[in-house]
Image (cartoon, grey):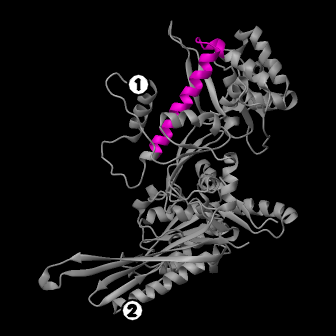
Amino acid sequence: MVRLVGLSTTLATNALVEDRGGRVGLVLIGMDETNLAALHFSRVRHVPGKIDISGRESQPLDIAAATAAIRELIERERAEALAVAGISSIRNPIHELAVRKLAQSVGDLPVVCGHELSQQLGAVDRANTAAHNARLLPLIRRLIDSVHAVLLERLPNAPLYIVKGDGTLMDHRRALERPIETVASGPAASAVGARTLTASESDMLVLDVGGTTSDAAMLHEGRPILRATGAEVGGRHLAFPALALSTEGLGGDSRIAVRLNHRRGKPALLALGPERAIPLCFLATQYPPVHEQLKQFLETPDKIGYHHQPGDFLVLIARHAGLPLRSNQARMLDILESEGPMHLSWLAHRADVMDSKLLGWEELVRAGLVGLAGLTPTDLWHARGDLRLWNAAAAETALTLYAQRYASGREALISDVFSLMTERLAQLVLRKALDEPERPREEDWDDAAFARRAVAETRRGGRWVQLRPRLQAPLVGLGAPAALLLPEVARVLDAELRLPEHGAVANAVGAASARIEIAASVLVKDSGVGCFTVHTPHEQAEFDNLDAAKDHARKRLREILEEMAMRAGAGRFTLDLREEDHFIQGPAHLGGTTFLRCDLVGRAIGLPKA
């Protein structure tokens, strides 16, 4: 019996990178025009009103201006969702809540408030986070509706949970409200899967080798280490915690290119990634004529063309009527649709153009209408006999063609490709290990440069000195290529390597085994002589007695955690509450230490309802 369905998704991450989503109107309260440069959105309205850092209203909210701004965004800008962000809303959200209430009275649109998504300081980051969350709402709705349609047919009683970017779960209804929290969902699920598959709650460094990219993350005592300053995606800083991830554009489907060198006597240049290619062994399995075209190049290699790689085949993925096409692009799509995958040089000839660049094929690859095939590490594994999934003969033919360009020959080409992969993966792991949060940092230190030097010296040695890194925690390898690539990486890094039996599906294991964990905080501050203010994510309250303020703060923190845990879909859960007092040291004749603030932080931990 299926108790629940866990889903990890790259939807939010990809949408942010590709700049996709719904039309969002952003209402800024108490911010000035200088903030616009740091925002990623054009449908913006400024409304007067301000909350100071202590949470007091220093300027009333201009209700008339707020109403007008909302109407303009809905009627003139055709916004599909609204985001609201104000100065110091984490100290007192009264203005954001008032604008949301106004918006709900004006139109039937979803409204996202910045204080609900983040309790971090930084109004601009909260504004961007709220707006991106609002922009993702229609996308996550379509995804979850599609998944539900399948579940209704096959598993009508199984609840659906979504993996968050910190490796924990939330109920799908919560995800519909907060899709931004699914950023880094996929890698986070893999990290949790590593914990489950190794049955370990100890420290570990996880390397997930995929088709296009390889991701490195760390777990401390079984918990994924998060980026304390907030998630970073596509150059955008988001004000909520997510997996601290390091990524390299390198995987089993990375495109291998051998570029001829114009300089006399110089060897050909080898390039690997970061772009992905469809492995030729796979393409030839789906379309056998691809292998025949490759074999013809063995007899007439000059027909490949100087600017092309021997494996540069294009294959039609989809036809999109909404994309404007130039005549050469339309002709190329017609040929691919009627005749199947074709090498770029032949395609240029069939389309009657002098150079394949005139086809505009690169634009169609970026748009996802056409796929580019080529020699990949997956092909080399087939040619070498390490894998037997697809057409190994086609992989061998392609390797022969590439080796003809590579002066050192077939075996050297294979060796150099995997040597390059080992070095880059070892550097990725070492950079991640050096990213340990507690490690002190020097201003002039460069982790990437050190990683390159250390890995190079470990592999090749030095005359006077040799650097030999040693990982203090096990290296856990995930993904289908891990067993083929990581033993050498572990040797270079002097690491204990663990390859879980089902590491290829660690992402799915993590999605099914993740826990629900909710964090929240409440602040008690000395706001003046005999006055103490309690700041929660939803309101503030004032007391004339510190003990009474702390009691209220503890009570509210419990209530907030319990409510959030239930909304996230937790069944039974436990609460972990901690508090820390902060004092300032004053003169002894004035009483010595003076109370400054008390930070109360809590965590609800439990399993999802089945």
Q: Say few, some or many: other residues with alpha carbon within 10 Å of mark 1 (under 14 / 14 to 19 / 20 or more).
A: some
- Which residue is nearer to you in this view: 222 or 586? 222
**Toward which corner of the image does residue 370 lie, by quadrant?**
top right
Q: Is residue 463 visible?
A: yes
Secondary element at image label 1: loop
- Which residue is nearer to you in this view: 241 or 502? 502
**Toward which corner of the image does residue 559 lie, by quadrant?**
bottom right
Q: Say few, some or many: other residues with alpha carbon within 10 Å of mark 2 (under 14 / 14 to 19 / 20 or more).
A: few
What amino acid is at disc 1? Gly
Check residue 404 for magenta coloring: yes
Q: Residue at x 29, y 91 (%)?
A: 530
Q: Position of residue 582 (x, y in %)?
A: 31, 76
Q: Quadrant of the N terminus?
A: bottom right
The residue pinned by badge 2 equals 548
Q: Residue at x 73, y 42 (%)?
A: 323
Query: Is disc 2 in contact with disc 1, using a CB cutoff of under 8 Å?
Result: no
The residue pinned by badge 1 equals 461
Q: Position of residue 89 (x, y in %)?
A: 45, 74
What amino acid is at disc 2? Ala
Q: In screen coordinates, is 552 left or right of 356?
A: left
What number is the disc on residue 252? none
Q: In screen coordinates, is 54 left or right of 45?
A: left
Q: CA distance from mark 2 to mark 1?
A: 66 Å
Secondary element at image label 2: helix
Question: Above or below — where is 394 with respect to 535?
Answer: above
**Toward which corner of the image does residue 192 lie, by quadrant?**
bottom right
Question: Above or below — where is 242 with respect to 531?
Answer: above
Question: Above or below — where is 313 with respect to 471?
Answer: above
Q: Please name which of the two marks, 2 or 1, marks the residue nearer to the observer.
A: 1
The stretch in magenta equals 403-432
Q: Position of residue 258 (x, y in %)?
A: 60, 20
Question: Magenta region's main secondary structure?
Answer: helix
